[in-house]
Amino acid sequence: MPARRLDPQRLLRALSEQRAASSRAPWTGPDTVSALGAACLEAVTTALDAGSDPLREALRGAVLYSLDELEQRAPGRSVEVRVPPFGAVQVIAGPRHTRGTPPNVVETDPVTWVLLATGRLGWERARRSGRISASGPRADLSGHLPLPGFVSRPDAGDDAPGRSN
């Protein structure tokens, strides 16, 4: 299942609703997919940090945007990353998979994916707690997460970015 394309109008609606739900001012930034996707990711993490459930459409935008970012930063087709029900991408250079179930699969829920992508949850902690399913010898995204450019919090645990395991 390929990642679904991001529609700027749909992202803007989702971002506006999430910001309103968090009692934040309306979005006044650029209306590009990149800016809106990053803003959705930030709005979702703000909601999560506040202990609130993010709105479904904003969570969808954040997941699709961050999957797209991972796909651009780790090009390849040897690992399939699935975040149902929103999307999946194939990433990381290596042997290409073309039929059936790929040998290297990472699967997680949308909230866990956002936490991983932003460094609010470390790879090893998510793996140990069962929040991700990773099968195959290449299904370790710890070298690719959190996504560069996203602020991480120091409470990601023993495997927070910048710390050794």
Image (tube, rainbow, N blue to C red):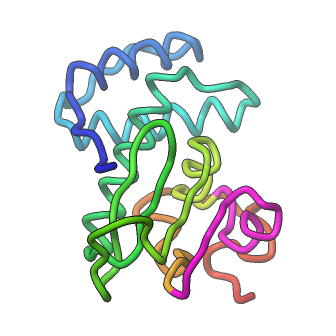
Locate residue 148, reporting x and y percent: 41, 67
Q: At 67% from the left edge and 35% from the top edge, which residue is drawn? A: 48
Front position in the image: 123 or 93: 93
Q: At 64% from the left edge and 49% from the top edge, which residue is drawn? A: 112
Q: Along the horizontal axis of the image, is 118 left or right of 5?
A: right
Q: Is 17 situated above or below 74?
A: above
Front position in the image: 135 or 44: 135
Front position in the image: 101 or 136: 101
Q: At 20% from the left edge and 27% from the top edge, which residue is drawn? A: 8
Front position in the image: 39 or 136: 136
Q: Is 115 situated above or below 56?
A: below
Q: Is 55 situated above or below 51?
A: above
Locate residue 44, reporting x and y percent: 54, 33
Q: In this picture, which residue range is highlighted in magenta?
A: 120-137
Q: Is 164 situated above or below 16?
A: below
Locate residue 7, reporting x and y percent: 20, 28
In terms of image quadrants, where is residue 32? top left
In terms of image quadrants, where is residue 28? top left
In terms of image quadrants, where is residue 109? top right
Magenta residue check for 125: yes
Magenta residue check for 91: no
What is the number of callouts on the image?
0
Q: Along the horizontal axis of the image, is 87 left or right of 30?
A: right
Locate residue 52, reporting x and y percent: 71, 25
Q: At 59% from the left edge and 26% from the top edge, which residue is drawn? A: 54
Which residue is farthest front? 100
Where's the C terminus, which quadrant? bottom right
